[in-house]
Image (cartoon, rainbow, N blue to C red):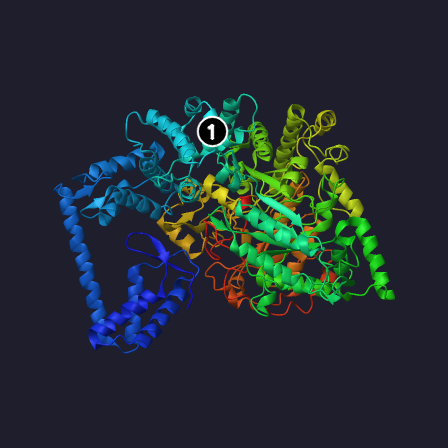
């Protein structure tokens, strides 16, 4: 029986429930009493125990402890009539508990008598001092945290874990684990765990003791030494030695390490810090790491390089701006592949197909996330003139692409990641929809790559009108991949006429509603293909004069032109809204500073970057696109006291992104003035005086219908237009909002632009799992004297939802709604108002708590009507979860169901009928009701969790163990 639950060990650590251990313990009990292990019976009893654990705790963060599991084992034995075995098991438990108690009493006695020995890092032995341990804990806390942290409780737990002969490193790890296990009580324990981990990193990595008097001096000297050692071992770019290292070392600020939470420090140490080849020890601690990144990016500067490096350092070390993972990995290294995303398109040519395989392998090798358009390949059954045979279509080539992805380990740190796109009119599109299914011919399945549908507006119109849709093979309609908007619609209609006359050999005509139904069915079942829109992506593109956007990237936020000669590249970084609220006000001056410096860093990446292919270098040097994004949007809402499900949130999404867009564009203009405009600026929308906000009108004109997004502005855009006209733009594209899951872990903020997933959740790193409560919620409850152990336990019982917890004011309940408690249209609406300022796109997950196919259809139609360019994963709840409680969303006149207790595997999920009265009413509803009726047929979701939420990240939440992501390149 596979379980997704945890247990709490006696030392406070949270680990996976392991049924095999239960079976083994029962076997030992049988062996002791009956002199035979009775393997089958032991397994059966263990399975019964597991079922009881799942029923009581499954999907919850109210984890059982070891004693509770053992109680269930006793019940299981007695229920089968094995009373002698149960008696032996009880005696065994009692004896071992007594042994543990006696051993602990002996340890405490030795500590009191100063007889417990500890082994230091250099091998010396000294008497264990409980006072030193207390001193380290007190040193690791701020004055404010000392009033919150129960030091005696920490010390008591530490004493339970120490033993005679324990090493210094083991003791420090014990301290960290104890503090970490208490994080759920208060954010102060998070800060304590972070500082204890930092203390260990300083000692083990750079040989600096935080308790020493001259720690600052040693810290700066260690930085210079680490850079020199890294260069000597060819881990760092030798050009770093051309900087005045002593000068930049003086700018290092150790206190900025205190901005990091425990998971941030642990994530950096686990995956980002460079280790020496010779000693296998860290060359970096957080401030060394940030400065190394800053120095690497500053290599592009031709003058005042130290000054720019210091500016870059100041902006990243304070977590105001965080570059994407490839930049953090490789900045300042000999092969600085700093770019995040690569997009390419495959021509209908065997040589080019295999060239793209090779290109993608190289791009993946250097940590790039890949998005590839396959729409130009002819469909199954199309004639291959040179050989006189029929084509096998796109699917077999995608199978090879899948295997290439699996074979590549990006930068030696993570597996390759690829997304493949196909236009919705392609002859093989219906087979494409099934690529991620876990049933059917495995030769036509791709379980390791992501899939996305590239959808023209015309398909959405045909679905709405209950019309027909025709699939074509690209070899007979070669211009459809290059057309969009009205021109696409005209050409498509012409090809349909030709097909009706018999002038086109290969085509299929079906009801558009059936195509849409299958798209949503596969999306619900497998999480793929994602829904992305071709026309908005092209109509709003600044670069419409030099090419076509054929697809998006791995995380659906990049919309750049591609061709056989050009592989689009994007360089990403995110502004952290969580640190841009000052005294309860969104600090636009601070945003201006952050955005201006961040844009310069991103532009530098274009010049510094190591390009794995010439097509990538050609494209990036011609157009110089960058993707400045945002994260911590929900953090800012909490600090500004704005509910996500509100018009105030929509307004903040609008005005906050306007500020970011305003200063990002002006920063690119300033860079153009200093360094020159990008090569293809002439003729671009920028050159024609068309800004991102203007393109909403263009989309309306092409689509032939209104997009209900306000065009109001609050800043002086006349000045921006004048500046562009005078100096041009340095970058063809400036903004894109990536998922940011990994870098948000580092920064301690909520990822990207989404609401919080859960108010209580489980985070993970290589040391194990630990429970975290939403710190903003804790702070607000403290102010009302409502935060205590009883509330914590109730929050665990409700899996994070406070909707039904008595005594919490309604205003707080509204403020701290979890994502599945928020009508998705609020999230889409905010994205649409934000999106009018963005020249690329946003990585936007769709959170769907219902089970109705018609309702799911309406969510995506609403996203399309609001003008969104792309969507990302579909996140869903299990059917049993949906049925358990209701949350009103009166704003839209609908009621939706949401679980507040446990979650079962999605293998039991079915798309179920929702009463018409529960469906939101919109202009298309009557048509959609007809389109989606009967409801999507029940479909069993895959038994393994991977199909819906791909490979895991370092953050794993309750319920689905997180909205997991594939593209760390964008984060």
541 left or right, relative to 966: right
Q: Secondary structure at mark 1?
A: helix
Q: Where residue 311 sits in the image (x, y, percent)?
A: 51, 26
Q: Residue at x 69, y 57 (%)?
A: 921
Q: How many marks?
A: 1
Q: Residue at x 58, y 31 (%)?
A: 604
Residue 554 visible in this rendered orientation of the protein: no
Query: Looking at the image, which residue sits at the far front?
Result: 387
Q: Is residue 179 above or below residue 406?
A: above
Q: Look at the image and tell me in which quarter the N terminus lies.
A: bottom left
Locate residue 237 relative to residue 129 in the image: left or right.
Answer: right
- Measured from the top left, where is residue 822 in percent x and y? 57, 51
Q: Is residue 208 above or below residue 813?
A: above
Q: Position of residue 413 (x, y in %)?
A: 46, 47
In the image, 271 versus 858, the foreground residue is: 271
Location of residue 313 with respect to 781 vertically, above or below: above
640 or 834: nearer the viewer = 834
Nearer the observer, 475 or 326? 475
Q: Position of residue 646 (x, y in %)?
A: 60, 45
Q: Is residue 971 visible?
A: yes
Q: Residues within 10 Å of mark 1 (few under 14, many from 20)?
A: many
* Residue at the spot 77% in from the left edge and 35% down from the top edge: 683
Q: Residue at x 23, y 69 (%)?
A: 89
- Image quadrant assignment for residue 206: top left
Say whether residue 150 is left or right of residue 398. left
Q: Which residue is mark 1?
A: 240
């Amino acid at each position: 029986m596979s379980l997704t639950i945890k247990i709490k060990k006696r030392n406070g650590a949270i680990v996976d429930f392991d049924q095999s251990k239960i079976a083994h313990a029962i076997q030992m009990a049988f062996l002791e009493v009956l002199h035979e292990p009775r393997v089958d019976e032991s397994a059966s009893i263990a399975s019964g125990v597991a079922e009881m654990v799942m029923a009581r705790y499954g999907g919850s963060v109210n984890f059982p402890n070891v004693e509770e599991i053992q109680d269930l084992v006793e019940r299981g034995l007695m229920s089968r009539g094995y009373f002698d075995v149960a008696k032996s098991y009880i005696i065994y438990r009692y004896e071992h508990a007594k042994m543990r108690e006696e051993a602990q009493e002996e340890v405490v006695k030795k500590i009191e008598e100063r007889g417990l020995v500890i082994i230091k890092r250099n091998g010396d032995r000294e008497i264990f001092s409980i006072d030193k341990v207390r001193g380290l804990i007190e040193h690791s806390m701020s004055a404010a945290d000392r009033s919150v942290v129960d030091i005696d409780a920490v010390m008591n737990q530490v004493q339970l874990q120490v033993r005679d002969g324990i090493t210094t490193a083991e003791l420090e790890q014990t301290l960290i684990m104890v503090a970490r296990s208490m994080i759920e009580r208060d954010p102060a324990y998070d800060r304590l765990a972070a500082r204890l981990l930092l203390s260990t990193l300083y000692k083990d990595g750079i040989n600096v003791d935080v308790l020493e008097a001259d720690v600052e001096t040693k810290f700066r000297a260690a930085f210079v030494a680490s850079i020199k050692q890294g260069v000597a071992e060819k881990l760092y770019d030798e050009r770093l030695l051309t900087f005045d290292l002593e000068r930049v070392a003086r700018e290092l600020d150790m206190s900025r390490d205190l901005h990091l939470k425990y998971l941030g420090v642990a994530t950096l140490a686990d995956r980002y810090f460079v280790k020496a080849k010779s000693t296998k020890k860290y060359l970096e601690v957080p401030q060394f790491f940030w400065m190394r990144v800053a120095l690497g990016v500053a290599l592009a500067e031709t003058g005042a390089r130290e000054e720019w490096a210091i500016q870059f350092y100041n902006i990243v070390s304070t977590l105001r701006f965080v570059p994407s993972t490839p930049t953090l990995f490789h900045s300042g290294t000999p092969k600085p592949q700093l770019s995040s995303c690569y997009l390419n398109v495959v021509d209908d040519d065997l040589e080019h197909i295999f060239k793209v395989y090779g290109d993608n392998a190289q791009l993946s090798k250097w940590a790039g996330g890949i998005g590839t358009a396959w729409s130009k390949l002819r469909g199954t059954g199309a004639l291959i003139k040179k050989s006189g045979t029929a084509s096998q279509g796109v699917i077999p080539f995608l199978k090879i692409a899948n295997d290439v992805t699996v074979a590549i380990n990006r930068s030696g740190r993570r597996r390759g990641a690829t997304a493949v796109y196909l236009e919705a009119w392609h002859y093989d599109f219906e087979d494409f929809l099934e690529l991620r299914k876990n049933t059917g011919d495995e030769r036509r399945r791709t379980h390791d790559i992501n899939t996305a549908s590239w959808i023209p507006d015309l398909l959405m119109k045909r679905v709405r009108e209950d019309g027909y849709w025709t699939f074509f093979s690209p070899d007979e309609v070669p211009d459809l991949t290059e057309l969009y908007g009205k021109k696409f619609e005209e050409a498509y209609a012409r090809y349909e006429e030709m097909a009706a006359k018999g002038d086109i050999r290969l085509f299929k005509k079906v009801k558009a509603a059936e195509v849409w139904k299958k798209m949503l069915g596969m999306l619900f079942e497998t999480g793929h293909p994602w829904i992305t829109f071709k026309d908005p992506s092209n109509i709003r593109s600044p670069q419409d004069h030099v090419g076509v956007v054929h697809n998006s990237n791995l995380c659906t936020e990049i919309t750049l032109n591609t061709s056989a000669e050009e592989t689009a590249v994007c360089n990403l970084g995110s502004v952290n809204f969580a640190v841009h609220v000052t005294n309860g006000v969104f600090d636009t001056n601070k945003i201006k500073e952050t955005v201006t410096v961040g844009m310069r860093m991103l532009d530098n990446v274009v010049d510094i970057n190591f390009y794995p292919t010439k097509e990538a270098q050609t494209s990036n040097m011609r157009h110089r696109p960058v993707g400045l994004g945002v994260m911590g949007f929900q953090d800012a809402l909490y600090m500004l006291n704005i509910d996500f499900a509100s018009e105030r949130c929509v307004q903040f999404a609008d005005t906050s992104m306007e500020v970011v867009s305003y200063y990002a564009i002006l920063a690119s203009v300033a860079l153009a003035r200093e360094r020159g405009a990008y090569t293809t600026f002439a003729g671009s929308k920028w050159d024609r005086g068309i800004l991102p906000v203007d393109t909403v009108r263009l989309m309306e004109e092409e689509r032939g219908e209104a997009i209900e997004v306000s065009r109001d502005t609050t800043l002086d855009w006349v000045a921006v237009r004048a500046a562009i006209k005078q100096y041009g733009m340095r970058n063809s594209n400036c903004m894109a909002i990536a998922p940011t899951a990994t870098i948000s872990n580092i920064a301690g903020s909520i990822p990207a632009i989404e609401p919080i997933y859960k108010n209580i959740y489980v985070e993970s790193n290589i040391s194990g799992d630990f429970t975290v409560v939403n710190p903003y919620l804790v702070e607000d409850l403290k102010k009302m004297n409502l935060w205590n152990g009883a509330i914590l336990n109730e929050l665990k019982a409700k899996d994070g939802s406070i909707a039904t917890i008595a005594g919490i004011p309604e205003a707080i309940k509204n403020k701290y709604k979890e994502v599945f408690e928020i009508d998705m249209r609020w999230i889409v609406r905010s994205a649409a108002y934000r999106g009018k300022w963005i020249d690329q796109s946003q990585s936007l997950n769709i959170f769907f708590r219902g089970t109705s196919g018609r309702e799911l259809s309406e969510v995506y139609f609403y996203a399309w009507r609001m003008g969104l360019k792309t969507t990302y994963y579909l996140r869903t709840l299990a059917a049993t979860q949906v049925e358990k409680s209701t949350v009103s969303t009166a704003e839209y006149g609908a009621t939706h169901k949401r679980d507040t207790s446990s979650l079962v595997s999605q293998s039991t999920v079915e798309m179920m009928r929702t009463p018409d009265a529960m469906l939101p009413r919109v202009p298309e509803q009557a048509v959609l009701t007809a389109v989606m009726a009967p409801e999507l047929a029940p479909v069993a979701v895959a038994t393994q969790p991977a199909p819906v939420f791909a490979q895991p990240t370092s953050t794993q939440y309750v319920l689905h163990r997180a909205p997991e992501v594939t593209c760390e390149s964008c984060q």
